[in-house]
Every structure is written in C-alpha cells, then in structure tokens.
Amino acid sequence: MGHPRINRVQSLHSCDSLASFYVTRLACVFTKSHRQTGGQPTKLQEIMRILFLNGPNLNLLGQREPEVYGHTTLAEIESKVRQHASSRQAEVEFRQTNSEGDLVGWIQEARGHFDVIVLNAAAYTHTSIALRDAIAAVGLPTIEVHLSNISAREDFRHRSLIAPVCRGQIAGFGTESYTLAVDAAISLK
C-alpha cells in the first residue's frame, strides 16, 4: 500500500525553537465497533486539520458585553471545540490576536498545513479588505463564524467583507456556532 503521506510543516509560531518538523497526516481511527473486535484497527483515515482564528477582543469573552456574547470564555470555547473535534476524528489549532496583520499572516501560512480555516474576524469582519484578500489568495475553504447574529445587530455590523470569499457563515448560535463550524468543516472533506 505504500507509506503514509508525510507533510513538511513549517512552524507557525515565531517563538518556536524548532523551525520545522514532520508529521504524519494519517492515523488509525478506532470506532466503537473496532473496540468490540479487540481494538484492532481496520482502516486508516486521514485526520481533518482545522485552524480556528479569533480576532480582536475575543480574548475578553466572558467579561465583555455578556448580554451579547455570554459568560463563556474563549478558553472554555476552545476546550468544548477540542472535545467535539476529537469525537469527530479532527484536530484543531486555536489562535487569537488583536492584530489584523497576525490574522493575515496565519491565513497565508495555513496552506499545506490545514484543511479548513474557521475564522471569527470579530470587528475586522466589517472592515478588513486585507483579510478578504488573504482568504481569496490562499484558497483554503474558510468558514466565517460569529457568536452573535451580526445581521440583527447595529447597521455597521450587517455587512461582512469576508463573506463573499468564505464557503459559509455560521452566526447567532452563541458558543454552539463554534461546534457547528467543526461539523461544517468536516462536511467539506
């Protein structure tokens, strides 16, 4: 059958001491039926890699406008997403920044390392041509996600500059928007 596909992955964090490393993108997936047959894997399945990018002020979730965004922190959302993704045989990486440039850089670096990007660009959703252009240039399926229903909020939040280059938009389901995005990402496989 040959060897599992090995992809070279460049470090996506500037603080990493290791410039690059090799990872296998294939893993044995044990389903309940596999455990019932003595735990023997019956097939190899490629793991879906999903990059979650979170924009400005999302580090303040749980404190910032809880009547709009709820009391759940971004760390709690990340934990819930990781648990859900694991149950669906997917891997996630979570990042947050208040810098538009960091988001653009992470989108550009994602090609070849991730299968789908889930992006909560927060306020940059409505202002950033740079994010829109980065998504279009990289060509990775991107899902726009928001905790609140941006169409039911202030007029300036009704228009998303990134929506035209995203595969879809999930908004208004609170923290469930993020777990729904995992399911949507997997459906793109």
Image (cartoon, rainbow, N blue to C red):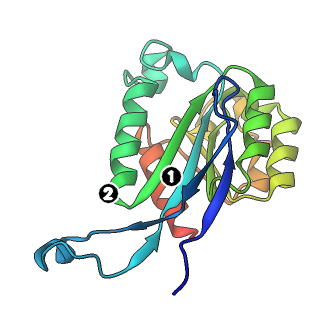
For label 2, count other residues whose C-alpha is less than 10 Å away and answer few (under 14), some (14-19) or many (20+): few
Q: Mark 1 or 2 closer to N-term?
A: 2
Kindly check if marks 1 and 2 are in contact, taking CB atoms under 8 A apart as contact.
Answer: no
Residue 186 percent location from the top left of the image: 50, 64
Q: Quadrant of residue 13?
A: top right
Q: Quadrant of the C terminus?
A: bottom right
For this rendering, which residue is in front, 27 or 53?
Answer: 27
Residue at position x 43%, y 35% in the image: 78
Q: Quadrant of residue 188?
A: bottom right
Q: Determine whether, in the image, residue 7 is placed left or right of residue 46.
A: right
Seen as rendered, the residue at the extreme top is 63
SS at mark 1?
Answer: helix
Residue at position x 53%, y 41% in the image: 93
Q: Determine whether, in the image, residue 57 is placed left or right of residue 124.
A: left
What residue sits right under mark 2 in the picture? 87
Nearest-to-viewer mark from 1 and 2: 2
- The total number of labels drawn is 2
Residue 145 percent location from the top left of the image: 58, 44
- Mark 1 to mark 2 CA distance (whole Å): 14 Å
For this rendering, which residue is in front, 85 or 2?
Answer: 2
Seen as rendered, the residue at the extreme bottom is 1
Please name the amino acid that badge 2 sits on: Ser
For this rendering, which residue is in front, 40 or 188?
Answer: 40
What residue sits right under mark 1 in the picture? 181
SS at mark 2?
Answer: helix
Q: Quadrant of residue 73?
A: top left
Residue 64 percent location from the top left of the image: 50, 14
Residue at position x 66%, y 22% in the image: 15
54 versus 30 height, above or below: above
Please name the amino acid that badge 1 sits on: Ala
